[in-house]
Image (cartoon, helix red, strand yellow):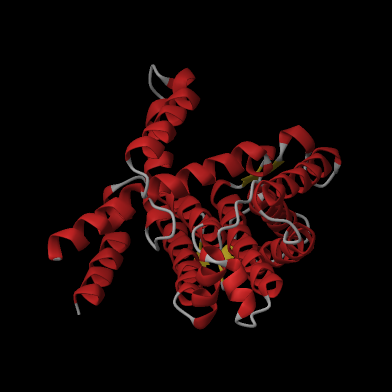
């Protein structure tokens, strides 16, 4: 009962948030929270460190922007098209990457993501270094005008809640239990008869698809898809968000993403704007040294100790 009350309180806060804060900043936080949660599915629960998730995030943004702006698809269909493109790209990358483990897996994902990045630079439909600009927000189901920031916020909230629901369902299903077993003791899971590569690939594709959903939604919010979305720096940022919030927790990545995005937005407009990268690096070092379980992970550990 306490858990459901907490969920109801959180949902209430999310519904009234645009009345208290700038809706565009809130939408950016939601998109990156979903991105970090998708990444946490493979790192926190699958034990797979990917340095190439920006390819899915940025790739879906470009495909969505092109589908809406050039093909004239409705907003919801454009987002679905971008998400489907991320799913296909995730399948192609995953088939190659899961053949290796550890640092080799990370380097393969990074290399393939950089190949995708250079394709975006050279392709005409992406706008090159200028990015794909002027993506229309359109309407939702032909009824709700998404050019209004508050209406767009509630649309983004619905999309992100759907993505979070998929992740939570995967984590708490038998599939999620097997994924944890693979993370903790892969030889043991193999001896129990589980097809390790199949589970890893499915987790990778789900993670890439949800990351693409976040990128597709972000491109509609800001009416822009740029090379920043697909750069390897973005893959590094999502690692920082996940570790800061709490690896292997449901709400940790969302908390980490909220803090990082808020700090970036606050610092970039102040006298410390040129030091944002340095400050983010210091936060990462402090997190690794002092909060090994992340913010949410440390809070959960403290609560367990207090109740025991």
Q: Is residue 116 above or below residue 14?
A: above
Left or right? Give the position of 265 relative to 106.
left
Q: Is residue 183 above or below residue 102?
A: below
Residue at 23%, 67% (x, y): give it. 9
Left or right? Give the position of 185 relative to 308.
right
- Residue 197 occupies which quadrant of the picture? bottom right
Q: In front here: 130 or 164?
A: 164
Residue at 68%, 44% (x, y): give it. 230
**Quarter that holds the N terminus:** bottom left
Q: In front here: 136 or 261?
A: 261
Residue 268 pos. (x, y %): 44, 26
Residue 213 pos. (x, y %): 59, 62
Residue at 27%, 64% (x, y): give it. 10
Task: Let me know if residue 24 appears in the view.
Answer: no
Q: In front here: 271 or 286?
A: 286
Left or right? Give the position of 186 relative to 122.
left
Residue 267 pos. (x, y %): 39, 27
Left or right? Give the position of 107 relative to 239.
right
- Residue 6 occupies which quadrant of the picture? bottom left
Task: Let me know if residue 212 appears in the view.
Answer: yes
- Residue 25 occupies which quadrant of the picture? top left
**Quarter that holds the C terminus:** bottom left
């Amino acid at each position: 009962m306490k858990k459901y009350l907490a969920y109801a309180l959180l949902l209430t806060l999310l519904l009234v948030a645009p009345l208290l804060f700038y809706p565009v900043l809130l939408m950016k936080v939601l998109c990156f929270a979903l991105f970090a949660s998708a990444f946490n599915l493979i790192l926190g629960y699958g034990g797979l460190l990917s340095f190439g998730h920006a390819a899915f995030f940025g790739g879906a943004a470009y495909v969505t922007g092109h589908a809406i702006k050039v093909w004239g698809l409705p907003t919801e269909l454009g987002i679905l098209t971008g998400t489907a493109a991320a799913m296909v790209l995730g399948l192609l990358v995953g088939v190659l990457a899961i053949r290796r483990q550890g640092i080799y897996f990370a380097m393969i994902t990074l290399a393939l993501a950089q190949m995708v990045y250079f394709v975006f630079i050279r392709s005409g439909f992406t706008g090159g270094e200028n990015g794909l600009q002027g993506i229309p927000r359109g309407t939702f189901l032909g009824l709700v005008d998404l050019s209004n920031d508050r209406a767009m916020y509630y649309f983004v909230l619905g999309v992100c809640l759907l993505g979070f629901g998929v992740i939570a369902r995967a984590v708490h299903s038998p599939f999620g239990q097997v994924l944890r077993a693979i993370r903790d003791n892969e030889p043991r899971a193999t001896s129990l008869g589980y097809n390790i590569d199949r589970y890893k690939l499915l987790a990778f594709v789900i993670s890439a698809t949800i990351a693409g959903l976040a990128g597709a939604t972000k491109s509609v919010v800001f009416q822009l898809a740029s090379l920043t979305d697909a750069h390897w720096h973005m893959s590094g940022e999502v690692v920082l968000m996940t570790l800061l919030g709490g690896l292997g927790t449901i709400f940790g990545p969302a908390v980490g993403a909220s803090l990082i995005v808020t700090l970036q937005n606050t610092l970039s407009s102040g006298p410390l704007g040129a030091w944002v990268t340095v400050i983010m690096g210091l936060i990462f070092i402090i997190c690794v040294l002092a909060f090994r379980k992340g913010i949410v992970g440390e809070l959960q550990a403290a609560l367990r100790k207090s109740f025991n």
